[in-house]
Image (cartoon, rainbow, N blue to C red):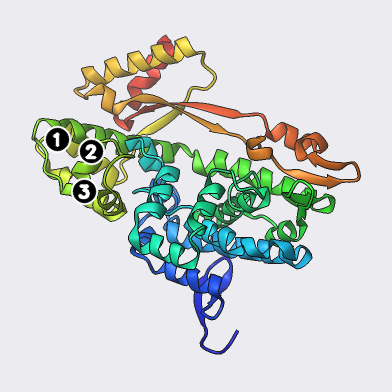
């Protein structure tokens, strides 16, 4: 790399991520990073409203996407040293890794819960319809876009190419576990990245991503980390409560907009009134955390008491409580919810907006997209066939939560005793 030929991004996890202007593939990556659609990811938090629970969770989809690309480059370039025939796929792997989350909406995954959009669908649309991205991809190669779509749909003829981006052991998961652990302050997410990358390999016969037998312990640890991050961070009850309030606030806003009782800009109106996956590209890309948070702040003064209160609660972090009712059978849960809503109505609340049941599910491992293959003396074997620990992690861990405002907590104790 020549002096002054690099663009460097200083990352808290991976250090200096340097891209070489003189390398055609890395030059393309720099161009893609500079597009408006990718820069928009700076304004979308990686963990949505999780900063309400973990105050350091302020990192963006932009920093995560750069991190995924950096990990993918390390993994792919190392494998290429042993299998140089893979080198033509470098541009596909790195571009797909960089742009894999470009379709995320405001509050990241939370937008999908609230509005019913799908970031994978929007990633595809943005690559195809955003002129600044499409032109750069087509200029590099007319086949590049189709090859990237094959990666996202797990149809690329060389499985390793898409498995590095989207599988049970991909560069996306490796980065977000480390990054989310770092920014939330949780110790669960510390994985041995170097050891895992050194263990990754390629099977020329099946063309799959594989793991050397000596690296199995590091992968087992990675799966344990993933299990605990879901159980203790991503599915934290405060995250569930914050998401509930956001969802109910926008549900109320949608209802008021239908009767011309709400003021919102064109972007938010588009998100509230139509099919989120079918809206014009410009309306989707115009939305970010700032646009929606601004409206929530304004709506605190709305004349509708339900919308105003929900928005105030979110902005002031006056969140609802979550009671673990996993031990109750389905009928008893519904009875408890019904009595809770009756008590809320008696106390003057619009009960359906203030209480409900949510289910969270954590699982450390599934056979999703061919699972994780270990190179053993007997050939390629599923890690779950070799590891009793992974067999245990494959069992789902479900928790059921009753959501309610803290104001009725004393009364809820009485309600519980009657169920």
Quarter holding the N terminus is bottom right
Mark sitting earlier along the chain (1/2): 1
User: Could you say where residue 303 lies in the image, as x and y percent from the top left?
Assistant: 9, 37
| Distance in Å between CA atoms under marks 1 and 2 | 8 Å
Up-down: is 395 above or below 5? Answer: above
Along the viewing direction, whichever of 397 and 148 lies nearer the viewer: 148
Q: Which dot marks residue 267?
A: 3
- Whether tag 1 and tag 2 are in contact, CB under 8 A, the answer is yes
Judge whether residue 59 can be spotted in this image: no
Tell me where residue 33 sits by quadrant.
bottom left
User: Could you say where residue 372 lies in the image, as x and y percent from the top left?
Assistant: 72, 43
Up-down: is 114 above or below 202? Answer: above
Element under disc 2: helix
| Distance in Å between CA atoms under marks 1 and 3 | 13 Å
Q: Which dot marks residue 411?
A: none
The residue drawn where x is 55% and y is 90% is: 3
Q: Which residue is mark 1?
A: 257
Along the viewing direction, whichever of 43 and 73 lies nearer the viewer: 73
Q: Which residue is mark 2?
A: 272
| Distance in Å between CA atoms under marks 3 and 2 | 9 Å
Mark sitting earlier along the chain (3/2): 3
The residue drawn where x is 36% and y is 21% is: 412
Judge whether residue 380 can be spotted in this image: yes
- Mark 3 packing: few (<14 Cα in 10 Å), some, or many (20+)? some
């Amino acid at each position: 790399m020549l002096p002054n030929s690099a663009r460097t991004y200083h990352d808290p996890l991976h250090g200096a991520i340097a891209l070489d202007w003189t390398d055609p593939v890395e030059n393309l990556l720099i161009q893609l990073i500079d597009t408006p659609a990718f820069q928009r990811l700076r304004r979308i938090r990686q963990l949505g409203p999780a900063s309400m629970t973990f105050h350091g969770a302020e990192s963006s989809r932009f920093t995560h996407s750069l991190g995924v690309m950096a990990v993918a480059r390390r993994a792919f370039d190392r494998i290429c040293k042993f299998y140089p025939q893979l080198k033509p796929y470098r541009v596909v792997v790195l571009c797909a890794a960089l742009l894999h989350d470009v379709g995320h909406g405001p509050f990241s995954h939370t937008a999908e819960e609230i509005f019913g959009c799908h970031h994978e669908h929007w990633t595809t649309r943005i690559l195809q319809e955003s002129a600044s991205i499409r032109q750069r991809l087509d200029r590099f190669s007319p086949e590049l876009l189709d090859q990237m779509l094959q990666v996202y749909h797990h149809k690329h003829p060389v499985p390793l190419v898409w498995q590095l981006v989207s599988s049970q052991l991909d560069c996306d998961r490796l980065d977000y576990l480390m990054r989310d652990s770092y920014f939330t302050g949780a110790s669960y997410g510390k994985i041995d990245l170097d050891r895992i990358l050194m263990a990754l390999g390629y099977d020329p016969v099946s063309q799959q991503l594989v793991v050397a037998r000596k690296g199995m312990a590091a992968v087992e640890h990675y799966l344990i980390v993933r299990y605990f991050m879901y159980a203790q961070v991503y599915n934290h009850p405060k995250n569930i409560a914050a998401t509930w309030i956001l969802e109910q606030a926008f549900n109320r806003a949608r209802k008021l907009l239908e009767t011309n009782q709400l003021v919102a800009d064109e972007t938010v109106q588009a998100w509230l009134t139509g099919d989120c996956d079918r809206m014009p590209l410009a309306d989707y890309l115009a939305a970010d955390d700032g646009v929606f948070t601004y409206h929530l702040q304004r709506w605190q003064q709305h004349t509708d008491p339900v919308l105003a209160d929900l928005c105030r609660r979110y902005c002031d972090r006056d969140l609802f409580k979550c009671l673990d009712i996993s031990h109750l059978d389905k009928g008893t849960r519904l009875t408890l919810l019904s009595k809770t809503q009756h008590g809320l109505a008696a106390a003057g609340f619009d009960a359906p907006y203030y209480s409900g049941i949510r289910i969270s599910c954590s699982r450390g491992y599934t056979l999703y997209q061919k699972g994780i293959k270990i190179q053993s003396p007997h050939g390629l074997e599923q890690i779950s066939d070799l590891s009793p620990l992974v067999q245990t992690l494959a069992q789902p861990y479900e928790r059921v939560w009753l959501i309610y405002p803290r104001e009725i907590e004393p009364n809820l104790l009485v309600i519980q005793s009657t169920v």
